[in-house]
Amino acid sequence: MIRDLDEFKRVSDVIVANRITDDIRDQRDKLYTRDLFNSD
């Protein structure tokens, strides 16, 4: 388990999330989501 978000973002190839948040918005190239309400 990785508790440090910056390390998680660095080592992850793909990030699957229910919602796009400001914490992961900088990882758009790795991000997969079906967030219909915050699609930008």
Image: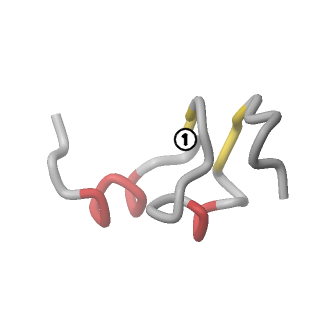
Query: Splitting the image into 4 quarters, where does residue 10 fall?
Result: bottom left
Q: Quadrant of the N terminus?
A: top left
Observer-nearest of 18 and 5 = 18
**Residue found 82% across the figure and 34% down from its top:** 36
Q: Position of residue 3 (x, y in %)?
A: 15, 47
Query: Splitting the image into 4 quarters, where does residue 28 fall?
Result: bottom right
**Residue found 82% across the figure and 49% down from its top:** 39
Residue located farthest toward the bottom when viewing the structure as drawn? 26
Q: Position of residue 33 (x, y in %)?
A: 70, 35
Query: Splitting the image into 4 quarters, where does residue 32 fall?
Result: top right
Left or right of 31? Residue 24 is left
Q: Secondary structure at mark 1?
A: strand
Residue located farthest toward the front when viewing the structure as drawn? 37
Observer-nearest of 6 and 11 = 6
Q: Quadrant of the C terminus?
A: bottom right
Colour mapping = secondary structure
Q: Position of residue 29 (x, y in %)?
A: 72, 59
Q: Amino acid at mark 1?
A: Ile
**Residue found 60% across the figure and 39% down from its top:** 19
Q: How many marks?
A: 1
For label 1, the crowd category at 10 Å Cα-Cα, with few meaning under 14, some 14 to 19 and many 20 or more, is some
Q: Position of residue 13 (x, y in %)?
A: 55, 46
Per the image, the residue denoted by label 1 is 15
Decide: is 7 above or below 2.
Answer: below
Observer-nearest of 37 and 7 = 37
Left or right of 32? Residue 20 is left
Observer-nearest of 11 and 5 = 5
